[in-house]
Structure formats: C-alpha cells, structure tokens
C-alpha cells in the first residue's frame, strides 16, 4: 500500500459534477457572488480537496499496517508525534494534532512507517477524536495481537477554537489502553514519560 496521499476518495471523483454544483449553491446561499474571479474555480478546488482529505474512505485501515513480521522483540515500541489532520463530523471543521502509539509485541511487528499510515487511514474521514483513539488501538490489537497497546491523541479543534466558545490554543487529549498497559501502571508511566521527552 502506498501512502494515503497516493489515494483519493473514489466517491468524490465519481460525483465530481454534483459536488461542484452543490458547493456553488452553498456559496450563493451564504451571500457570495460566485461569478467573481476569486470564486470561479472554488467548487472544483473544494472537490479536489475532498478527494484528498477524505481519502480514508478508500482505504481499509487494517491494511495500512501492511505486511507484518515475525520478531522476538517483546519490549516497548513507540512511534510518537505522528501529525494528523481530520474533519470534525459535527461541524465539518478541521481538527489536527499528534498521535503517539506504543505497543509491546508478542512475536509480530509492523514497519514503523506503517503506524503513520494507519493514522492517516483513520483520520482522513469525518471523525471525532475519541473514535480515532479507539480505532487505532483496536486495529493495532486486532492485526498485531501484541501484549499491550497504548494510544494518546492530542488535538486542536477549530469547531471549539474559531467558533462556539472560541477558546484558541485549547487542546483535547484522549487515550486508549489495551492489554498489559491496562494492568501495569509502570508500563503506562514509561510510555507517558517517553512521549513527553
């Protein structure tokens, strides 16, 4: 599987004319002059953007982990600071931040870049941060069957920062804990300490 950027949302491509039409109608309904120079190509640009930012619908996140490998390493593996961009399903406003993934293998490992691809496959769709966190942990558990998984997601949500309560700079942090991380406070503490460094 290539990077998520190699994929486009096929439903958007198949419905390009309809989406462009509706984007133009929305612009008109908010009071814009769709005939002015700056907006002439906006419906087409928005449609091309949708192909990219919603590419996750065209990818099975489980396949994002790709080929896994037999490996006897059974110590903590962490990939931290994986940057993501997503769209809030409640307002269709962007939210973005970082994902930190730690797992303790039980004989199977994934290529490190595959964890970043998993994040892309899960986040490039309409989402909520809580679901992103849970899905990543559950897919890691299902595909790799590790001793334990811990996922921490940090996010800044424009639906909260730029509208509504208007609290820019506020961050949301969510976590999901599976397997040995759940029952071992020392392992959780090690993970949390290492992602803060």
Image (cartoon, helix red, strand yellow):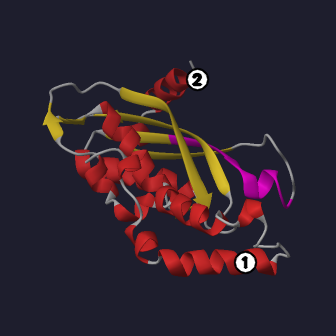
Judging depth in this view, the residue of 168 and 10 nearest the camera is 10
Q: Where 40 sits versus 132, above or below? A: below
Q: Can see residue 132?
A: yes
Residue 106 placement (x, y as % from top left) = 21, 36
Q: Can see residue 106?
A: no
Q: In the shown orientation, is residue 44 left or right of residue 110? A: right
Q: Residues within 10 Å of mark 1 (few under 14, many from 20)?
A: some
Name the mark on residue 196. Answer: 2
Q: In the shown orientation, is residue 119 left or right of residue 126? A: left
Mark closer to the chain start, 2 or 1: 1
Name the mark on residue 26. Answer: 1
Q: Element under label 1? A: helix
Q: In the shown orientation, is residue 195 left or right of residue 187? A: right
Count numbered badges in the picture: 2
Q: Is residue 154 magenta?
A: yes
| Residue occupying the far left of the picture | 70
Q: Which residues are magenta?
A: 152-164
Residue 97 placement (x, y as % from top left) = 61, 41
Q: Is residue 31 magenta?
A: no
Q: Element under label 2? A: helix
Cα separation between marks 2 and 1: 43 Å
Q: Are marks 2 and 1 in contact (CB under 8 Å)?
A: no
Judging depth in this view, the residue of 96 and 52 nearest the camera is 52
Q: Nearer the viewer, mark 2 or mark 1?
A: 1
Q: Quadrant of the C terminus?
A: top right
Residue 122 placement (x, y as % from top left) = 44, 55
Quarter of the rendering containing residue 160: bottom right
Please give the name of the residue rendered at 38% of the width and 68% of the height, measured from the top-left corner: 10
Please give the name of the residue rendered at 40% of the width and 53% of the height, measured from the top-left corner: 121
């Amino acid at each position: 599987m290539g990077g998520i950027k190699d994929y486009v949302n096929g439903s958007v491509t198949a419905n390009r004319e309809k989406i462009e039409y509706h984007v133009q109608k929305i612009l008109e309904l908010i009071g814009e002059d769709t005939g002015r120079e700056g907006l002439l190509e906006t419906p087409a640009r928005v449609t091309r953007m949708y192909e990219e930012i919603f590419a996750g619908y065209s990818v099975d996140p489980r396949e994002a982990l790709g080929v896994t490998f037999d490996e006897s390493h059974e110590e903590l593996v962490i990939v931290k600071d994986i940057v993501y961009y997503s769209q809030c399903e409640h307002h269709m406003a962007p939210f973005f931040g970082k994902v930190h993934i730690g797992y303790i293998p039980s004989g199977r490992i994934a290529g490190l870049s595959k964890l970043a691809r998993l994040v892309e496959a899960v986040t490039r769709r309409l989402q909520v941060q809580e679901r992103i966190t849970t899905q990543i942990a559950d897919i890691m558990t299902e595909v790799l069957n590790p001793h334990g998984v811990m996922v921490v997601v940090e996010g800044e949500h424009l639906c909260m920062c730029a509208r509504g309560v208007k609290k820019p700079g506020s961050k949301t942090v969510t976590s999901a804990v599976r397997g040995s991380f759940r029952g071992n406070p020392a392992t959780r503490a090690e993970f949390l300490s290492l992602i803060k460094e």
